[in-house]
Amino acid sequence: MVKVTFVSSDGTRRAVDIAEGETAREAALFNDVPGIDGDCGGVCACATCHVFVDPAWIDKVGRLAEGGAEADLLQFAEGANEYSRLACQIPIEPLVEGLILHVPEQQY
Amino acid sequence: MDTDMVEPNIREKVAFIPIDEIDVARPSLFQKDTVGLFFERLRREEPVHYCRESYVGPYWSITKFDDIMAVDTNHKVFSSEAKLGGIAIEDMHSAKSALELEMFIAMDPPKHNQQRKAVTGAVAPSNLLLLEPTIRERACQILDDLPVGEDIDWVDKVAVELTTMTLATLFDFPWEERRKLTRWSDVTTAAPETGIVASYEARRAELIECAMYFKGLWEQRINAEPKNDLISMMAHSPATRDMPFLEFLGNLLLLIVGGNDTTRNSISGGVLALNQNPDAYLKLNNDPGLITSMVPEIIRWQTPLTHMRRTALQDWEIGGKKIRKGDKVVMWYLSGNRDETVIDRADEFIIDRKNPRHHLSFGYGIHRCMGNRLAELQLRIIWEEIHKRFAKIEVTGEPERLFSNLVRGITKLPVRLHAR
């Protein structure tokens, strides 16, 4: 299991455990973390699992690849910035043990 | 669709018609609400289906959830470009179409992206928070004015009125003239067969009138300080302010139709669904907290836009079928939303569904409905306020449906209100 912490827009922290091989989307949904909708089922098609990767973690997680499907969708999301990613595109692996993700106020 | 109400001989006909002869583009199938029987058979026997001859020419039908998702998210292969035909089963720039309107829903990147970004802020979650009190106040007013115990038409008195008010709010449209918006929305999607317009020429004339009206508003807003309404945003944004006029008009009409027909028909569709499923209605009355999950279930159930269309830019294989470059590909959301292999008990209206937002009604990918949160907001508000006032909205007669293969519309819904 890998530990991931979600920080809501009001600052509430919520640490959850999630199995390797899942994604950060599942880490949120399986643990009822509020603010992550994940409408499309985790296939990078809707941008309702938008998160801001904590700046300290962005290099380990990796930045948004320009011109990819994920960037195509995030360009329309409210408040998207250089730390924006879709949780469904963040694989859970031992490398990200302790990962911190910030949840936007609302999903679009 | 409500299969119980369908005559048995239609079921038999659908079962025995040679599969090659199935043509789900016929608007009458939607008006009679029997198209679901055809989709059921296609999903089972030939989920990616080619129709050789129809009034819109040959086209592919994509009927299963996952195949639809695959087409919708692949905009590099499946184009929305108006010049290739656009986004509806009927070609956009055909001889029948009124004006050469250009709208970002019928564009591919990069132009689509620039224009969408310019207006997306109007319906972004933070702007909706500002709009919510106004929408609620207006919803309350509509409901408070309704007569209890009398037969009324829910469509005209509530569904149209609420969505029109919301649109007028979004556009900061002259309040007393707001029904013009409803009219223009209807006219934009209307064919003469619907009775909404007398002829294609008449439609053209009305759209020109609409164009002139908006030109006036545009000039007013461009000379004023920028504000949060859509016209002001478009007049002042660098991505849209130098737009050719037909493009400006096209995008406005897109937002009007997008925000009008769809929500209107979900508001009516929800009332109908609850009446057809009395257990669900009882459950809702006992626990109004279920409105949160009922709203997306209503949107799935109604599927207010039955389909979106794409044009293949290259040969491509889906579900074992070879689609050729240039082919017309129709993603039937209405069918995918009844796909049992993805949605549990897809033929049932379940207001406390576990994963209710996993439906196709908003589409997926870069063209996904921009106003989806606004639609949900309006539905949530109206149901919260209905719950406070009425024990039941009883459907007292047969609903009438729109003659259209695109807008799944309810044109008349006789109801009687019962006070709480």
Image (tube, rainbow, N blue to C red):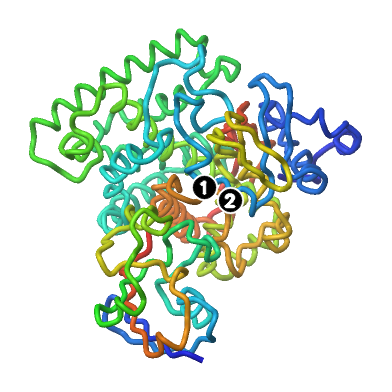
Q: CA distance from mark 2 to mark 1?
A: 6 Å
Q: Element type at marker 2?
A: helix
Foreground residue, B27 or B400?
B27
Q: Quadrant of residue B5?
A: top right
Task: Examine the rendered structure and indicate whether residue B16 appears above or below residue B291.
Answer: above
Residue under numbered circle 2? B70
Which quadrant of the figure has residue B111?
top left
Which class describes the residues within 10 Å of circle 1: few (<14), some (14-19), or many (20+)?
A: some
B45 with respect to B239 (left or right): right
Instruction: For residue B179, say whether it is visible.
Output: no
Report which residue position mark 1 lands on: B74
Parent chain of label 2: B
Asked whether the beta carbons under mark 2 and mark 1 sit within 8 Å of each other, the answer is yes
Vertical comparison of B111 with B276: above or below: above
* Chain designation of label 1: B
State left or right for residue B124 relative to residue B364: left
Q: What residue is shown at x 54% (from left), y 31% (from top)?
A: B88
Which kind of residue does numbered mark 1 sit on? Asn
In this rendered view, identify the residue nearer to me: B190 or A45: A45
* x then y, percent, for residue A6: 37, 82
Indicate the secondary structure of the residue bearing disc 1.
Answer: loop
Kindly identify the residue that appears in the image at 54 percent across and 64 percent down: B293
Image point (63%, 41%), residue name: B332
Residue at 79% x, 31% y is B22
Nearer to me, B407 or A41 = A41
How far across and how far down the image is residue B10, in percent?
Answer: 86, 34
Q: Nearer the viewer, residue B346 or A44?
A: A44
Give the residue type at disc 2: Ala
